[in-house]
Image (spheres, helix red, strand yellow):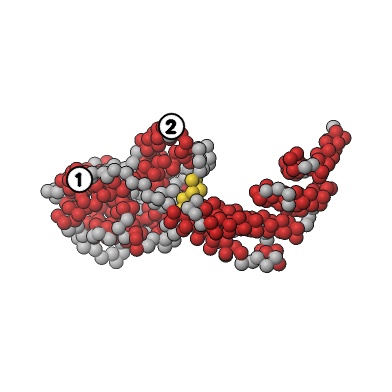
Amino acid sequence: MAASLNVLARALTDHALTADVSEFPGSVADLLDKHNLARDRADALAKRMRDLASSVETEAARGYRDRAARWHEVAGDPDEVSVDRLAVVSSLIAEAEGLDVEADAGSHPRSGYLYERAMKALRMIPRKRREALGVSELTTELGRRIRAAGAETLGTMGVFESESVDLSEARDHSVEAVSGKDALEALRAFVNLSSFSSLQDERDRAKQLLADHPLQTLFSSIHFARDGRVIHRSGGQGGEPIYGEDPATWRQMIQAYEIKVSLTVQGMLAPAWMALSNEHRLMLGDFVAIMRGSSVIPSDRERLIAQALYYGYDGDFLTAAQLLAPQVENIVRLHLRNAGQQTSTIDRGVEQEIGLSALMGRDAVLEIFGEDIAFEIRALFCGPIGPNLRNDFAHGLVSDASVGSVHALYCWWFVLRLAFVPFWNRIHDTRTADSHEPAERDRQSARENEMESEPGL
């Protein structure tokens, strides 16, 4: 058996070293590498792959230089590995620069993609060898070009317009729902203007739409930030799941969710908030009272979250959302911890909290919050597909343009509803009176020296 294997390995090696490109010597070299064969001929194979790169088209040439780098690596020649990889980088940059010169509408996404590949290949060269090759600053330049290509890509994107949607009936209904009631009933009507999104309904609608238009499931998509940065690449159908959903399905669910948020805010929440705030002047103490009576709110965050909700009620939704987004993460963490879940990691004696997106990937959140609330948190606060409020606020990525954001108002309403429903149930059902979960420190110590106005609800 061993003798037969050696004969086969020699035959394959001879083919890789002598065959014309039409006879796929590169694929044979890959086969040898995969099975750890021909290690004693690594230098010769590396030289052969490099020679072949000069006789084929651009993309194929890059493939042969990649193979040459791999065989030089097997041969233990790191300097030549870096030379081969830098050749790939230079080829990618040259092609991208050619597209930049053309500067037509379709060239920018392609050049951005090539620059990203060049960056990835460049980072495979150790820092010291980059310095020796005189390209230590190239990563900075490539980063600049990638962002520029992204910005140019956004500039060439068109706006799709549909027929206008008449929201007047929804607006009138929402205003009527909160008007002419006492403060508590009006607030209850306000938080009940819309229900939380149904995960099952959103999933079913997305799957039906993809079934009606199956081509949408075949392609991946690129997601850009407002400044042109590529922040996510979403796979097509069958790719890596996102929160347990097929990536094509999840992408469609989030697109529908963002439309729903926009229509809900503009058609119901914004006009109803104006009517509610004009009719009732709620104070900070009113929101503190609600937070104290809500089993969802940690007892050591009652005043902080009440303050954020008060800012929103006063019309400063952006400030409210910036305070509330990290508190949603704390709420999730507290309830997971109370359910016996580990919410931090310890590495070499240093304990670090696990981020919201990772926490929301656990099945336990479905049992604790229910699948609908879990979907809302994932869609509104987590991941680059969607508003991603937790990340944007945490990293200072919001700008003046976010002041009138529908996402900020919806975030405020979402947390208000999340807190108000348990509060309402508690005051109308004595069996829930002792259901408040403990926080990290004693409730009394959290209220020491607390000064607040008396609630007027």
Residue sitting at x 74%, y 43%: 21
For the point 84% across and 48% down, which residue is it?
40
- Of label 1 and label 2, which has the lower sequence position? 1
Name the quarter where the C terminus is drawn.
Answer: bottom left
Image coordinates for residue 225, horizontal then vertical, percent: 44, 55
Name the spot of residue 69 as percent of width and height, x first.
Answer: 73, 53
Q: Secondary structure at mark 2?
A: helix
The residue lying at 50 percent from left, 51 percent from top is 106
Q: Residue 405, can we see it?
A: yes
Most extreme residue toward the right is 3
Q: Is disc 1 surrounded by few (<14), some (14 to 19) or many (20+) residues within 10 Å?
A: few
Q: Which residue is mark 2?
A: 211
Tell me the kind of residue under disc 2.
Ala
| Quarter of image, res 166 | top left
Pinpoint residue 4: horizontal percent, then vertical percent: 85, 33
Determine which residue is flagged by label 1.
Answer: 168
**Towards the viewer: 120 or 300:** 120
Work out whether 414 lies above or below 199.
Answer: below
Element marked by disc 1:
helix
Q: Residue at x 83, y 48 (%)?
A: 41
Question: Amino acid type of disc 1?
Answer: Ser
